[in-house]
Image: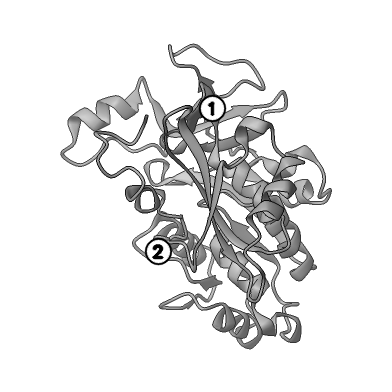
């Protein structure tokens, strides 16, 4: 097993414990480096790896990717943040003989509560590819609206989870624990829906949702659409103050090396893939996006300069 996730994170310590429990030799890398990941797979004949989307993004862009023997790799587990459809397609092409498992979970649920099996990755255009799979054994899921009502299949709300894996509470934070836990159900803070077959589709973190002109916009959907543009290497979408709409959708784009900063072209590309109210009102080009050690984009850091002077980051 190749372990490149931080060991203070559930994806690192949880994956490592499962590896030890099943008797695997574990190759631990202190820091993530795409070239060294590829070298380790070839050198140690790695069979299993956990890689978050940000890591997959760097690996598929690595120049040496086509010259390394990756045939030993049996499975890649990925999760921890939304993955653009185009990035998943490119990852599947690079690791042609590898089974992909998408997992979803939280530190508060001791890790994995849903899994999207390799069989669900076979048809690239299938709607299930946008889901994070179905609940694993011993896990119950439900989606609730603002008043606590259970939402029907296909309707977006907050995802709740009930399982023996759930935490007992936050250490010395009784109020936060009471807000998060109720009758054995844990509020995940994620917005999404369940389909008729029990597949869970996540839109985004509720706190990252943009309300523009009274419409809810989930950044992950916009990011996935923009990422498909041939000039875009990485992208983050945030809400910024707007006098007319309350909040406006802004995209922060990292370009591929040598590509022009063509905001209009990227906007036109997005126009054919998103409803009008979800389109970015503006695009800024940046050299890189701030991420935490588990690969999640630090949206709060990106929003900070745009919301300076406001009492709260909602307009």
Q: Nearer the viewer, residue 6 or 21?
A: 6
Q: Which of the 4 image quadrants contains residue 57?
A: bottom right
Q: Is residue 44 left or right of residue 252?
A: right
Q: Residue at x 44, y 60 (%)?
A: 294
Name the residue located 49 percent from the left edge and 69 percent from the top edge: 287
The Cα atoms of the two marked residues, 2 and 1, are separated by 29 Å
- What number of labels is visible? 2
Tag 1 residue: 216
| Earlier-in-chain disc, 2 versus 1 | 1
Residue at 69% of width from left, 72% of height from top?
73
The secondary element bearing badge 1 is classed as strand
Viewport quadrant of the C terminus: top left
Pointer 2: what residue?
293
As drawn, the label of residue 37 is none
Q: Is residue 181 left or right of residue 170?
A: right
Q: From what the image shows, is residue 182 above or below residue 249?
A: above
Give the camera-side residue of 314 and 153. 314
Does residue 112 show up?
Answer: no
- Position above or below: 66 against 245: below
Closest to the camera, between mark 2 and mark 1, is: 1
Q: Nearer the viewer, residue 89 or 75?
A: 89
Where residue 52 sits, quadrant-wise, is bottom right
Above or below 112: residue 232: below
User: How crowded is the residue under tag 1: few (<14 C-alpha within 10 Å), some, or many (20+)?
Assistant: few
């Amino acid at each position: 097993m190749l372990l490149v996730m931080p060991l203070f994170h559930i994806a690192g310590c949880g994956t490592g414990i499962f590896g030890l429990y099943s008797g695997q030799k574990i190759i631990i890398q202190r820091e993530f480096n795409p070239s060294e990941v590829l070298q380790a797979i070839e050198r140690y004949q790695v069979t299993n790896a956990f890689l978050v989307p940000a890591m997959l993004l760097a690996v598929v862009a690595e120049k040496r990717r086509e010259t390394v023997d990756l045939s030993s790799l049996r499975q890649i587990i990925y999760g921890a943040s939304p993955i653009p459809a185009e990035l998943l397609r490119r990852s599947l092409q690079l690791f042609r003989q590898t089974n992909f498992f998408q997992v979803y979970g939280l530190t508060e649920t001791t890790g994995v509560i849903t899994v999207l099996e390799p069989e669900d990755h076979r048809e690239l255009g299938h709607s299930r590819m946008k889901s994070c799979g179905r609940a694993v054994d011993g896990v119950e899921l439900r989606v609730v609206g603002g008043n606590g009502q259970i939402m029907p299949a296909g309707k977006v709300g907050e995802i709740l989870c009930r399982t023996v894996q759930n935490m007992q509470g936050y250490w010395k934070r009784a109020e936060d624990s009471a807000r998060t836990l109720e009758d054995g159900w844990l509020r995940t803070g994620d917005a999404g829906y369940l389909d008729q077959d029990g597949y869970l589709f996540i839109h985004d973190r509720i706190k990252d949702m943009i309300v523009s002109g009274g419409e809810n916009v989930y950044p992950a959907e916009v990011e996935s659409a923009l990422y498909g543009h041939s000039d875009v290497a990485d992208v983050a979408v945030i809400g910024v103050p707007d006098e007319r709409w309350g909040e406006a959708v802004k995209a922060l784009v990292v370009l591929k090396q040598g590509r022009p900063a063509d905001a209009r072209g990227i906007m036109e590309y997005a126009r054919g893939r998103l409803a009008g109210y979800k389109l970015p009102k503006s695009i800024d080009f940046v050299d890189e996006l701030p991420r935490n050690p588990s690969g999640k984009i630090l949206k709060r850091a990106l929003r900070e300069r745009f919301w300076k002077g406001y009492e709260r980051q909602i307009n």
